[in-house]
Amino acid sequence: MKFIQSIQSMKSVAACVAACATIVLTTPAHAQFAKPEDAIKYRKNALFVMQQNFSRVGAMAQGKAPFDAKVAAESAAVAEYMSKLPWVAFGEGTGQGDTKAKAEIWTDKAKFNSHAEKMQTELTKLSAAAKTGNLDNIKAAFGPAGSACKACHEDFRKD
Ligand code: ASC
């Protein structure tokens, strides 16, 4: 009897795991946020933390701040990580409100996604460069990363 009960409870655990996985996989990304304002705040804050860390590395790359290899590597790693976070918060219905996001984000998604991917790729390269501890490597990777930020802003951010 105990054996049968435990088989049955294992089955319901398995069913629940399957159902929960289905919900997670099929729920639109914007549904992770209680309201559109939260999505807007989330992506802006993620981009802000990314930008602060990116600029710290940039100041060193441009000779505006003394080079500190440890700070550069840590900052670039944080910028790389943060670069992955904003995108889930650009769901449908989050184009209005306290945001500079252009409507084209939602009408030209392929282009927006390609900018987003390019930026993540360049920040991954910047982080790898910063891990070498060599300022010349950082200088070489910083320019393309900044250009990736700029390119997306030109197409998709109101200013
Ligand atoms: C920054 C920042 C951006 C990019 C861009 C690079 O630090 O806030 O938007 O770099 O200016 O061209």
Image: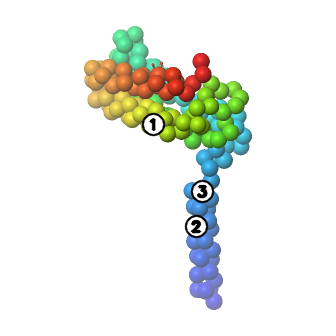
Quarter of the image where the C terminus is located: top right
Query: Which mark is first along the chain, 3 or 2?
Result: 2
Q: Residue 128 in the image: state x and y as whole percent.
A: 33, 33
Q: Secondary structure at mark 1?
A: helix
Residue 99 versus residue 30 in the image, above or below: above
| Label 2 crowd bin: few (<14), some (14–19), many (20+), radius 10 Å | few
Which quadrant of the figure contains the N terminus? bottom right
Residue 47 horizontal/vertical position (percent): 54, 29
What is the spatial separation of the Cα atoms under label 3 and label 1, in whole angstroms?
23 Å
Please name the residue that numbered disc 1 is placed on.
114
User: Seen from this angle, which residue lies furthest top?
Assistant: 64
Which secondary structure, mark 2? Answer: helix
- Judge from the rendering whether residue 109 lies leftward or rightward of residue 139; answer left or right: right
Closer to us: 53 or 95: 95
| Gap between marks 2 and 3 measured at Cα | 12 Å
Circle 2: residue type: Ala
Classify mark 3: helix, strand or loop.
helix
Given the image, on which type of amino acid does mark 1 rest?
Answer: Ser
Indicate the position of residue 66 as horizontal and vertical percent values: 37, 13
